[in-house]
Image: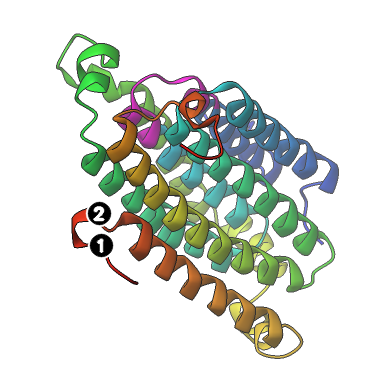
Amino acid sequence: MTTIPLFHVLILSSLLFLIGFVGVVARKNTLFMLMSLEVMLNAVGVAFIGAGSVWQQADGQVMFVLILTLAAAEVAVGLALLIRMQNKYRSLDIDLLNQMKG
Amino acid sequence: MFENVASIEGLFYFAGLVAVIASLKVVTGNNTVHALLYLVVSLLAVAVCFYLMGAPFAAGLEVIVYAGAILVLFVFAVLMFGLGADETKNAPKSKSLANMMGAMLLAAALLVEIVVIINNAEMQQSLQANVISSKAVGIMLYGPYLLAVEIASFLLLSGLLAGYHYAKPDATGGDL
């Protein structure tokens, strides 16, 4: 049993998630949106590790490893798409992508 | 100096505070490279939180994979974007080390915290008592979660292929 209460871990996790969410919603630069997504994924990892440590189960860390692979794949695809966007529009403004075909 | 906060909870709250401040700076930043610097600090702070929650394996993974690999990917991509306007418009005017002072101060605070944890034998003992070993994690990964591991490997493969396909210049075009 750890000395850190689960409630406080969850408060930290939701604070980080909220910061990342506000970043994704409010920013227009797609690169900053990707970074905010990283912060969000990280916050979910905090919640999983905290829960796993309170119940003394390895499942939390297993889920964290899976989140890590998800983040790696997401960043690879996201950055490749951003390179495409930069080549095509010479900008990373998300508002340039408001048409399905163009 | 650290007597009043030198409990595991106190250090956890401190690392959490550093993580929140660094994340706020990431989200509100203007300059891309500085935001990435703060993102590294945020990830390191979360790694310290993991260590204090009794998950040193996850803390190591956080530093190696997140701060070490994913952030380097970000930096390489930023270099490829050639964000010249970002540097001329959004970077602070001064060229001194003061640009990075905030991130460096936060990172130095984390370093001090880690040293305090490692030097405190009593705290080490209570951390060791409730640690979840990487062996247990490995047994779970290759036992009940084997299917999830296989799916994650497919995910990484598709990420690799998509990254290769999308980042390829049009001139080299043709089929994948």
In reply to whether residue B6 is colored magenta, the answer given is: no
**Principal secondary structure, stretch drawn in magenta:** helix
Q: Which secondary structure lies at badge 2?
A: helix
Q: Which mark is residue A43?
A: none
Question: Is B166 placed left or right of B117 in the picture?
Answer: left
Q: Residue at x 47, y 48 (%)?
A: B114
> How packed is label 1: few (under 14 Cα within 10 Å), some, or many (20 or more)?
few
Q: Which amino acid type is shown beneath numbered disc 2?
A: Asp
The quadrant holding residue B147 is bottom right
- Give residue A87's position: percent from left, percent from top: 28, 40
Q: Which secondary structure lies at badge 1?
A: loop
Q: Are marks 2 and 1 in contact (CB under 8 Å)?
A: yes
The quadrant holding residue B146 is bottom right
Q: Residue at x 31, y 22 (%)?
A: B101
In reply to whether residue B35 is colored magenta, the answer given is: yes
From the viewer's side, name the closer residue of B65 and B112.
B65
The quadrant holding residue B82 is top left
**In 3D space, how far apart are the residues under numbered discs 2 and 1 (Cα atoms)?**
5 Å
Return the residue at label 1. Answer: B173
From the viewer's side, name the closer residue of A90 and B102.
A90
Mark 1 chain? B
- Give residue B20's position: percent from left, percent from top: 59, 30
- The image's colour scheme reads rainbow
Q: Is residue B165 above or below residue A28?
A: below
> How packed is label 2: few (under 14 Cα within 10 Å), some, or many (20 or more)?
few
Range of magenta residues: B24-37
Q: Which amino acid type is shown beneath numbered disc 1?
A: Gly
From the viewer's side, name the closer residue of B123 and B84.
B84
Q: Is residue A31 above or below residue B159?
A: above
Return the residue at label 2. Answer: B170
Q: Residue at x 58, y 56 (%)?
A: B51
Question: Is A8 placed left or right of B47 in the picture?
Answer: right
